[in-house]
C-alpha cells in the first residue's frame, strides 16, 4: 500500500477516538441491561434454529498486522476498561459439563457472562435453558479464544471464560504495544505471517488474508523464535537433517531403547568426511553421536513429509509439511522443536511459487508424486514474519484471545494449557 503509515495513524486518530467513545458508552450500559433482562419462560419457546443466526460471525479476512486491527484493538481496550471499572464479568461455576438441551441453574450465570462479552444477544433473556441461542454464543466465544467450536462448556472453555476482565485488559494492552511496534515496519503487499500463540499462518495479499492455515509451533522448552525474513526456497520431497538439539534430546535416547530406530525411520548417519557410518559402531551411551550428521531420506515417513519452506535465519528454523496430519486437530498445537508445521501446505506453496515460472499447482503435484528431491528457488522471495500476538480485535465486537504459551504477557492464568 502506498499510504504512509504514520500519516495513516494520525489520520485515523479522530475516527478511532469517536469509535472508542461510542464503544465505551455502550459498555457502560451492558451490565445494567443484563441485570434488567427479562427472564424467559418455557424451554420449548427457545429451542429453535434461529439462535445461530443472531450471533455475528467471528471469521475475518482482516490481517492481524494492519492499521485497522490496531484501531479495533484500541476500541476493545476502551470497552474492557469500562467493564473493569464496573466490576468486570461474573464467574461461571466450572462444576459440570453444559451443552445444548440441558436445563440447569448454572446456565443463568453462563448467559450473563456471554451477554457481557457480546457473544449472546441480550434479547435472548435469562433462563436456565441451554438453548440454541446459548449454543451459538458458546461457539462464538470458543472461536474467539481459539478453542474447538463444539458448543460444550468443558475444562478449557471454563478456564478461558473465568479469566478476570482486568487480566484480559492487560493482555490487550501488551499486544497493542506489539502491534504498534510492527506498524513501523513495511510488510509490503504480499507476505506470510506466523502468529505463534494462535498457532496459525496467514497468507496476506494487499489489505486481506487470502488463506489461513492451522499450524503447529514450538514447545515451551523448544520455542519458535520471533523473526523477520524472506522465503527464498521451496524444497519438494526434502531430506531432513536432524539438528544437534534433536540428536541429543531425541535420537540418542531412542537409540538406547531401540537400536533399530534409525533403520526403521530411514535415517542415515554421516561423518565429517560425508562417508556413511554404521550406527552399530557408535557408542550410544555417550554423546558421540552429536558429532555426526543425521539425514532422513525423502518419503512418507520423512519428518517434513512432502515440502520444506526455507528462509534465511539464525535459528535454523523453517516451515514444513508433516506426516502426522492428525496433530492439526489437537486443542493445544505447541508440539514442535521450533519449526512450524503447516496444514494444507500445498495451497501455501502454490501461492508462494505463483511468480516462479514452471511451478504451477500441477507441476508441484507431479514433482511430489515422483519422490525425488527438488529444491526450487523462489523468483520473488516472499517476506515471512514470525510474531507473538495473543490478543487483538477485528471489529464488530469480535475480540480474540489466545493462550499465552510462552508467558510473554505477564499473567500465569493466561497460560491455560499449562495450568
Image (tube, grey):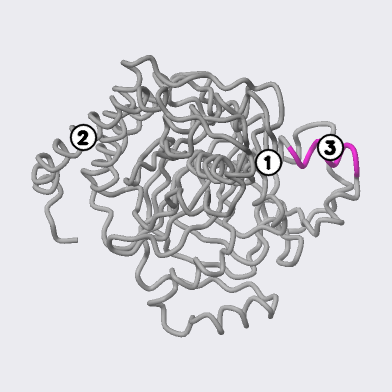
Q: On the rendered image, what quadrant is the N terminus found in?
A: bottom left
Q: Position of residue 256 (x, y in %)?
A: 87, 37
Q: Is residue 21 left or right of residue 182?
A: left
Q: Residue at x 90, y 45 (%)?
A: 259
Mark 3: few/some/many CA within 10 Å (<14, 14-19, 20+)? some
Residue at point 70%, 46% (across, down): 292
| First along the sequence among labels 1 and 3 | 1
Quadrant hosting residue 183: top left
Asked if residue 242 lies left or right of residue 116, the reply is: right
The residue beneath circle 1 is 246
- What mark, if any, has residue 210 been given in the picture? none
Q: Is residue 216 magenta?
A: no
Pointer 3 and pointer 2: residues touching (CB < 8 Å)?
no
- Majority secondary structure of the magenta segment? helix
The residue drawn where x is 39% and y is 39% is 399
Residue 10 position, x and y percent, is 9, 42
Disc assigned to residue 284: 3
Mark 2 burial class by Cα count in 10 Å: few <14, some 14-19, many 20+: many
Mark found first going from the N terminus, 2 or 1:
2
- Above or below, comparing residue 271 to residue 72 in the picture: below
**Mark drawn on residue 20:** 2
Q: Mark 2 falls on what kind of element?
A: helix
Residue drawn at point x = 55 percent, y = 24 percent: 109
* Residue 328, placed above or below residue 402: below
Which span is picked out in magenta? 250-258
- In this rendering, position of residue 300 left or right of residue 350: right
Residue 381 position within the rendered picture, expressed as x and y whole percent measured from the top left: 37, 65
Q: How far is disc 1 from disc 3 in space, using C-alphas? A: 14 Å
- Depth-wise, is mark 3 or mark 2 nearer the camera? 2
Tag 1 secondary structure = helix
**Quadrant location of residue 323?**
bottom right
Q: CA distance from mark 3 to mark 2?
A: 62 Å
Amino acid at each position: 500500500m502506498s499510504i504512509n503509515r504514520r500519516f495513516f495513524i494520525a489520520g485515523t486518530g479522530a475516527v478511532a477516538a469517536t469509535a472508542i467513545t461510542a464503544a465505551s458508552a455502550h459498555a457502560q450500559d451492558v451490565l445494567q441491561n443484563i441485570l434488567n433482562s427479562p427472564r424467559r419462560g418455557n424451554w420449548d419457546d427457545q429451542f429453535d434454529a434461529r439462535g445461530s443466526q443472531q450471533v455475528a460471525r467471528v471469521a475475518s479476512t482482516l490481517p492481524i498486522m494492519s492499521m485497522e486491527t490496531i484501531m479495533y484493538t484500541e476500541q476493545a481496550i476502551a470497552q474492557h476498561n469500562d467493564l473493569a471499572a464496573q466490576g468486570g464479568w461474573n464467574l461461571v461455576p466450572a462444576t459440570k459439563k453444559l451443552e445444548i438441551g440441558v436445563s440447569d441453574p448454572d446456565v443463568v450465570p453462563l448467559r450473563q457472562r456471554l451477554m457481557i462479552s457480546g457473544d449472546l444477544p441480550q434479547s435472548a433473556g435469562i433462563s436456565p435453558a441451554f438453548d440454541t441461542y446459548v449454543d451459538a454464543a458458546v461457539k462464538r466465544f470458543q472461536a474467539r479464544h481459539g478453542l474447538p467450536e463444539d458448543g460444550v462448556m468443558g475444562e478449557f472453555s471454563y478456564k478461558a471464560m473465568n479469566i478476570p476482565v482486568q487480566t484480559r485488559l492487560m493482555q490487550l494492552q501488551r499486544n497493542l504495544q506489539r502491534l504498534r511496534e510492527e506498524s513501523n515496519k513495511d510488510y509490503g503487499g504480499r507476505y506470510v505471517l506466523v502468529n505463534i500463540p494462535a498457532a496459525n499462518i496467514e497468507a496476506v495479499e494487499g489489505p486481506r488474508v487470502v488463506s489461513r492455515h492451522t499450524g503447529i509451533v514450538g514447545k515451551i522448552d523448544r520455542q519458535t523464535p520471533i523473526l523477520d525474513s524472506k522465503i527464498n526456497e521451496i524444497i519438494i520431497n526434502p531430506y531432513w537433517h536432524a539438528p544437534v538439539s534433536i540428536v541429543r534430546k531425541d535420537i540418542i535416547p531412542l537409540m538406547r531403547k531401540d537400536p533399530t530406530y534409525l533403520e526403521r525411520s530411514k535415517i542415515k548417519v554421516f561423518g565429517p568426511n560425508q562417508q556413511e557410518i554404521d550406527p552399530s559402531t557408535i557408542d550410544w551411551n555417550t554423546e558421540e553421536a552429536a558429532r555426526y550428521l543425521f539425514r532422513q531420506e525423502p518419503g512418507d515417513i520423512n519428518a517434513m513429509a512432502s515440502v520444506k519452506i526455507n528462509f534465511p535465519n539464525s535459528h535454523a528454523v523453517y516451515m514444513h509439511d508433516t506426516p502426522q496430519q492428525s496433530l492439526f486437530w489437537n486443542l493445544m498445537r505447541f508440539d514442535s522443536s521450533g519449526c512450524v508445521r503447516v496444514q494444507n501446505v500445498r495451497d501455501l506453496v502454490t501461492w508462494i511459487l505463483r511468480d516462479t515460472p514452471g511451478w504451477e499447482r500441477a507441476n508441484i503435484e507431479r514433482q511430489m508424486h515422483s519422490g525425488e528431491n527438488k529444491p526450487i528457488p523462489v523468483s520473488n522471495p516472499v517476506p515471512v514474519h514470525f510474531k507473538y500476538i495473543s490478543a487483538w480485535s477485528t471489529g464488530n465486537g469480535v475480540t480474540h484471545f489466545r493462550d499465552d504459551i510462552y508467558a510473554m504477557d505477564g499473567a500465569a492464568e493466561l497460560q491455560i494449557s499449562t495450568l
